[in-house]
Amino acid sequence: MNNTPQPAVPRQSHWSSDIAILAYIALATIIAHALTGNRYGFHRDELATLDDARHLAWGYIAYPPLTPFFGRISLILFGTSLAGFRFFAALAEAAAVLLTGLMARAMGARRTAQLIAALAAVPFCIAGGALMQYVSFDYFFWVLAAYSMVRLLQTDNPRWWLLIGAAIGLGMESKYTMAFLVAGIIAAVLLTDARRYLAGKWLWYGAAISILIFLPNLIWQLRHHFVSLEFLQTIHARDIRIGRTAGFLPGQLALMMLALPLAAAGLYFCLFSREGRRYRALAWMYLVPLALFFFFKARVYYMGPAYPMLYAAGSVWWQGWLRSRPRSVRAPEIKSRAAVVRPDSWTFLFLRIVAFTALTVDILIVSTFSLPIVPINSPAWKFTSKFNGDYRDEIGWPEFVQTLAQIRNSLPESERAHTAILAGNYGEAGAINLLGPQYGLPPAISGGNSFWAHGYGDPPPETVIVVGFSRRFVERNFNSFQLVAKTWNQFGVATEETEDHPEIYLCRGLKQSWPDFWKNFQYFG
């Protein structure tokens, strides 16, 4: 009997496992957003979402209900904290990064390949989680659907269709572009070996779950005459007119940046390679939305959620390619059997360094242009704000509301009770509703998007402070008016408010009745 003690096999700690490392990467993005998210101010889109969060419904003109729902939870947990309001968007993006690494893991990637896949997903996470917007939740549910599809194809367990259905339903409650991924999934089922699931019950159960989750918003749309379709048509026509949809295909290169070779490898792996045949459905889940978005002239970033699955597949292909390289080569000039050279170790190390360096560069570039980290009006600000117009939309709201409060306070006390503030766009109306109560301002009235449904107050106003409209508008609609102020901000930053419509008017005597004026006043933006 051999009593020689055997060396203990070290157990890997949960804190240093592959999944833990992926979680650390995701957590780092949340920390980055938390540390920088309280700079500048609320974005005009966030101000609209914040206001909608105070009026929960199963639908809104500009978007489905999920984003305002998370906004409401943020209000309950964090109040009107800027970083707190953005927390759930950052959390959703971070979860997508984790799922990207787990996708690679499920497809057979080892630690290094998992890390590469996850890091490739970080740039969009940084940009998408910088603001509280439906883009963040749409991104997460696309990635969740892709992850569930990978697990379905890997395990051949049809119950994964339930999670796919849930991801689709929740994605439709986040952003209607989820329908384009649904088209990709349908094509994937019909054109690959996944056809076998059509004969089972679980695919249909998943479809039923997705419809059931989306049903409340669908009913809301029916009751409101599908107003969101009219909104989307208006916004899409505007985007085409001003060039926001131009360069869709070249723009995909900008989305991938230095991760382009990884995504290309992932598409090749799924579409052509023998090893990736099992995951061929992922290729169609990418190609069909790409073709549809191109045909319908979508914005570039709409395809962003489709890339994590390619990054995961590309990391698996990269790992397989490295394994296929010769492990050792005999030096021809040396006769000894012991004398061999091993170029593989140096080659592998070099390629890893290149990969991680490239992805780090991507992360740093996107962080510089997406996170509010540079001082306003610094040389760096003047450079970054040219490429990221969102920065300008976060500036000047406190001064904007203070100016309106000064105008109202200058009126006789008897007149203030019958004074309303008519705002031109949802950002202005949202800023007034957020910051105005501390100055005793009434809620804003506006015809923009969801604000129109809130009406003009009861009783109707007699004096109106008009902001965000042209002189021609006030001349056409009021008997008397005077220019009383102009919009400004302490930084002197040119914004939509200071450049496009800076005049603030004090108006009296609406030329028609408020009901007649209001019924034709709704507009989209």
Image (cartoon, rainbow, N blue to C red):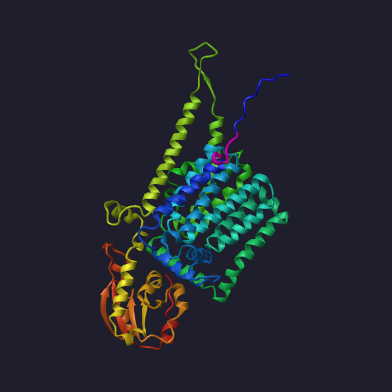
Q: Residue at x 43, y 72 (%)?
A: 524
Is residue 188 a member of the stretch shown in magenta? no
In the rendered image, residue 118, in percent from the top left (x then y), is placed at 51, 45
Q: Quadrant of the N terminus?
A: top right
In the rendered image, residue 224, in percent from the top left (x then y), is placed at 54, 76
Count of numbered circles in the view: 0
Q: Quadrant of the C terminus?
A: bottom left
Q: Is residue 271 visible?
A: no
Q: Nearer the viewer, residue 249 or 2?
A: 2
Instruction: Determine whether 14 is above or below 178 in the image.
Output: above
In the rendered image, residue 202, in percent from the top left (x then y), is placed at 70, 56
Q: Residue at x 67, y 47 (%)?
A: 193
Q: Is residue 23 visible?
A: yes
Instruction: Determine whether 334 is above or below 284 in the image.
Output: above
| Residues in magenta, as a range | 11-17
State the residue lying farthest toward the top.
335
Q: Residue at x 51, y 41 (%)?
A: 115
In the rendered image, residue 103, in percent from the top left (x then y), is placed at 57, 46
Specify whether 282 is left or right of 375. right
Instruction: Determine whether 88 is above or below 329 in the image.
Output: below
Q: Nearer the viewer, residue 244 or 82?
A: 82
Q: Nearer the viewer, residue 414 or 299?
A: 414
